[in-house]
Amino acid sequence: MLGAGVIGGGWAARFLLAGSDVQLFDPSPTAAQAVVTTLEKARRSWRRLTLAPLPAEGSLTLVDTVEAAVTGVDLVQESAPEREALKISLLAQAAEAAPPHAIIATSTSGLLPSRLADGMRGPERFIVGHPFNPVYLLPLVEIVAADRTSPEFVERAAAMYRAVAMKPLVVRREVDGFIADRLLEALWREALWLVADDVATVEEIDDAIRFGAGLRWSAMGTFLTYRLAGGDAGMRHFMAQFGPALALPWTHLMDVPVLDQALLDKLVAQSDAQAGGRSIAELERIRDDCLVAVLRGLAGEGFAAGEVVARTERELYERAGARSDGSAAADGRLRLHEVLAAPEWIDYNGHMTESRYLEVLADTTDAFLRRIGILGPYIDAGRSYYTVETHIRHLGEVHAGDRLSVTTRLLGHDEKRLHLFHEMRRAQDDAPVATGEHMLLHVDRAAGTTTPAAPEILAVLEQIAESQAELPWPEAAGSQVRGPRLRAA
Ligand SMILES: NC(=O)c1ccc[n+]([C@@H]2O[C@H](COP(=O)([O-])OP(=O)(O)OC[C@H]3O[C@@H](n4cnc5c(N)ncnc54)[C@H](O)[C@@H]3O)[C@@H](O)[C@H]2O)c1
């Protein structure tokens, strides 16, 4: 990797988390620290994005020369400042030293690749791989070939980006600004005019996006949105209805407001007011957490960027072998259930609503029952355990994306009864957030009565009880709802 700023650091984090080794060159003395900080942000986001087992992280090596960065690599990703002359000479230097099979990619936001490849050795290997900030979370990468790029390298680059959980979009031909930045620039131009003309503040413009179209864009883009706006008659009807409006002089189109001191001062003052004293780091955390929430939501639908997340999760599970049954013991306790707090679990107080605590605990009880053999044939034969009593203590707040991990104690059992104690913790700080104590009875569903569990089930329970015999009795077990007896006035 060449360059470790906002984008280069994001690339490094994405590849490292996907298990690739990274050799990085950046002349700035602060680059190393910046990458470490970005990697930390990326780890946090991925822990919140998926429970799928990520591969062991790749190794990061900071090197002193361009040559050392590109030696022996499969991909050179250049993310130096957006200056054409600098990029041309840096890319040429990299292409001299990189292996012939290595893809040479630039992150440029809009410079024409055929100009950047000027004088490069092996120009058939050169592509634009244009990512979006934060690179470790947003899946899109635009691939643009230069005039001498070979299609084989375009395909290889697409496969390589796909392997690090991205959505490669091959741009059909070389144009300034590619696809995404041309669209974004149109919006940006108009937004600047609206501020310059005092039609709206920067905050009002952001609200106009994020409370409306912005939400829709993440799933439907612009063309699917307008197809739906046309009703049953679709796009033809939409164009008939709204096409003529394009002739109205609504926008400034190609004009740009004069970026004089007064406009710059206004933009900066409004932007500072909008940030409300929150630091860049705080705003980045809000951005990343919200992006994770959107991606997680879309993953559930398997739509748009959610398709990439769902595909990546499938691949991660396949690569890690069969999904672990989670029954590995943690100091005698069983660790049976892990889950990410979903955005829809959050209530008006901003944290996980009460019923979801029970849901997570009940899912843990189900995992325990599977662990002891209460599975298909046993249940089909009409036998199961029913929960007859539950006591939950709420100890801490859970926010969207928090990873929850539950451990389980078997406090007691006999032929018909099971007494379980679950402890739910927030993975990021290991803070306890809830305990659940549950009494279950073994039943014969057809007869509608309690009945002894089968000997093979009781044998497993005996084993678990023995493995937990040394654990101290949980202080909270057997507790009741505390506090004074309240009387009606
Ligand atoms: N910021 C974005 O949102 C964004 C999005 C997509 C693409 N890009 C593109 O990515 C590239 C990098 O942008 P950025 O925002 O990360 O900029 P940045 O200023 O944050 O980082 C540039 C880094 O390059 C380093 N650098 C300077 N000269 C170098 C050299 N000769 N060799 C190696 N490294 C060198 C700098 O020290 C710095 O760390 C640009 O081409 C930009 O257009 C930016």
Image: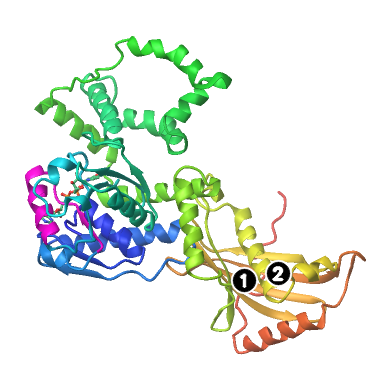
Question: Where residue 416 appears, x then y in whole percent?
Answer: 82, 77
Q: Is residue 187 left or right of residue 312?
A: left
Q: Amino acid at mark 1?
A: His
Task: Judge left or right: residue 87 versus residue 315.
Answer: left
Residue at horizontal 76%, vertical 80%?
Answer: 457
Amino acid type indicated by mark 2 = His
Q: Is residue 6 visible?
A: no
Image mark for residue 282: none
Residue 29, compared with residue 232, is above or below; it is: below
Where residue 335 sits, quadrant-wise, is: bottom right
* Residue 208 picture quarter: top left
Is residue 487 visible in the rendered structure shown here?
yes
Q: Is residue 39 above or below residue 148?
A: below
Measured in 3D between alpha carbons, the distance from the residue under mark 2 to the one under mark 1, in whole angstroms, is 8 Å
First in sequence: mark 2 vs mark 1:
1
Foreground of the two, 304 or 154: 154
Quadrant (top left, top right, bottom left, bottom right) of the N terminus: bottom left
Q: Which residue is mark 1?
A: 422
Residue 310 drawn at (x, y percent) = 50, 53
Name the residue tied to disc 2.
438
Dot 2 falls on a residue whose secondary structure is strand
Q: Above or below — where is 64 with respect to 291?
A: below
Q: Is residue 309 above or below residue 266?
A: below
Res. 33 image quadrant: bottom left
- Which residue does the image show at 11% across and 48% down from the upper left? 87
Looking at the image, which is closer to me, 58 or 340?
Answer: 58
Left or right side of 457 for 355: left
Task: In this rendered view, identify the residue nearer to me: 422 or 486.
Answer: 422
Magenta residue check for 400: no
Q: Which residues are magenta?
A: 74-96
Given contact means CB atoms under 8 Å apart, are the residues at marks 2 and 1 in contact?
A: yes
